[in-house]
Structure formats: C-alpha cells, structure tokens
Amino acid sequence: MKAKILLGIVLMNIMCVGIYLVIKPSPVEAGNSTAATSVQQQEILTPGEQMEVIRQREERVKAREMELKELEKQVGEKIKQLETLEAAVRTDLQSYKLVSGERVKHLVKIYSSMKPKAAATLMNNCDFDVAVEVFLNMKGDIAGSILAYMEPQKAASITQRLMTFRVGLGSTAAPETAAAVQ
C-alpha cells in the first residue's frame, strides 16, 4: 500500500517535471522570441557574427542538456528510493505473514486442546476470518466437533467459507491442511 502511494507520488512528480519542461520556455525558446528579428539581422550579419549566434545557440542547447541530465539524475535517485522502500515493505509484509501464521498455529493448538463445547463458545465470539483460519488449520474431526456446538448460522457461514476456500488466496494455512478441509 505504501509502495503504491509512493509510486503514485513519484509518477506525479515526473508528470509535473514534464509539464514544467513543456510550459517553461527553455533558453533556446527564449532566444526564438527574438528569432524573427535575428533573421532580419542575419541577412546583414557578417560571417563572424553568424558564428557567434551559432555558438550562443550551442551554449543554450548544452545548458538545456545539463538541466535534463540533472532531472534524469533526480528521477533516478527517486526511483532508487522507491525501490528501497518497496523492498522494506515486502520484508515487513513477509514478517507479518510469518508472525500471523505462527499466531494462527498457536490458536489452533489452544482450541484443539479445549473441550469442543468451550471452544465453540469462544469461537462464537471470535472474528469470522480468524475462526475460518483456525478451522482451516485444524484436523477435521476436531473442527467438526467444535462446529457442532457453535451457533448454527455462524457454523453454516464458516462451513460455507471453508468449502469455497482456495489455497493461496489470503490465507496463512498450509496447502495440505486446506486441501484436507476441502
């Protein structure tokens, strides 16, 4: 999420720089405002003066190239910063998934060791998604005995979710466990 926001900000910056470069008259364009008069003057300019005009234009082009190189450098630095941030976000996300998976395993052990009626009472008050994750990681016979004591509507909803669960979509459950539940 943070990476998407930062990527959006960088793209907006790039667009703004592009618009700025299009709108802002470059030194070359600024010289073009006097181009009409300089064309008239070129007719009467000596070859030395014409060379001076060409040299000045070359200097303006070189200055513009330097500006563009600086902007490219800045954009490159921002891209590197975004890549670093993206890597940090991915690392944090992997850590979160690992910790979340460990917590679910811990909950599975706790609920599996309880009597089914007591576990069902607690599961009735548990968040729906957490309950589904816990049941996905439980053995079928234990999950069935707990579901039997749960409120019928919640048990039916959890069962429906367990039947439509697809391995790898938003779950920390092991594929073999999820396949066994299905």
Image (cartoon, rainbow, N blue to C red):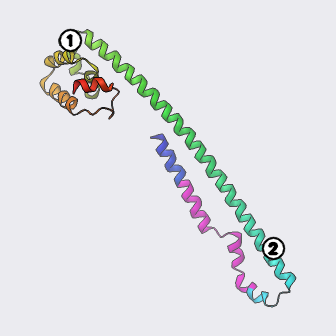
Label 2 neighbourhood size at 10 Å, few (<14), some (14-19), many (20+)? few
Q: In terms of secondary structure, where does tag 2 sit?
A: helix
Residue annotated with mark 2 = 55
Question: What residue appears at the point 16 percent right and 25 percent down from the top-left corner?
Answer: 155
Residue type marked 2:
Arg
Instruction: Answer whether residue 169 is magenta in the image.
Output: no
**Quadrant in which the N terminus appears:** top left
Which label sits in the foreground, 2 or 1?
Answer: 2
Q: Is residue 39 left or right of residue 140?
A: right
Magenta-highlighted residues: 12-38
Residue 19, horizontal then vertical, whole percent: 57, 64
Q: Position of residue 88 (x, y in %)?
A: 53, 34
Q: Report crowding for label 1: few under 14, some 14 to 19, many 20 or more residues within 10 A (C-alpha).
A: few
Determine the residue positioned at 23% across, 21% down.
125
* Residue ID at (22%, 24%): 181
Q: Position of residue 113 (x, y in %)?
A: 26, 9
The residue at which mark 1 appears reads as: 118
Quarter that holds the C terminus = top left
- Give the overall secondary structure of the magenta segment: helix
Spatial separation of the CA atoms under disc 2 and disc 1:
89 Å
Residue at left offset 87%, top offset 82%: 48
Above or below, 69 relative to 4 = below
Tell me: 148 left or right of 26.
Answer: left
Dot 2 or dot 1: first in sequence order is: 2
Q: How many marks?
A: 2
| For residue 1, side relative to residue 62 (left or right) | left
Task: Tell me, for residue 56, which label it has, or none.
Answer: none
Q: Is residue 61 left or right of residue 19?
A: right
- When the figure is inspected, residue 160 is found, relative to residue 39, above or below; the finding is above
- Magenta span has 24? yes
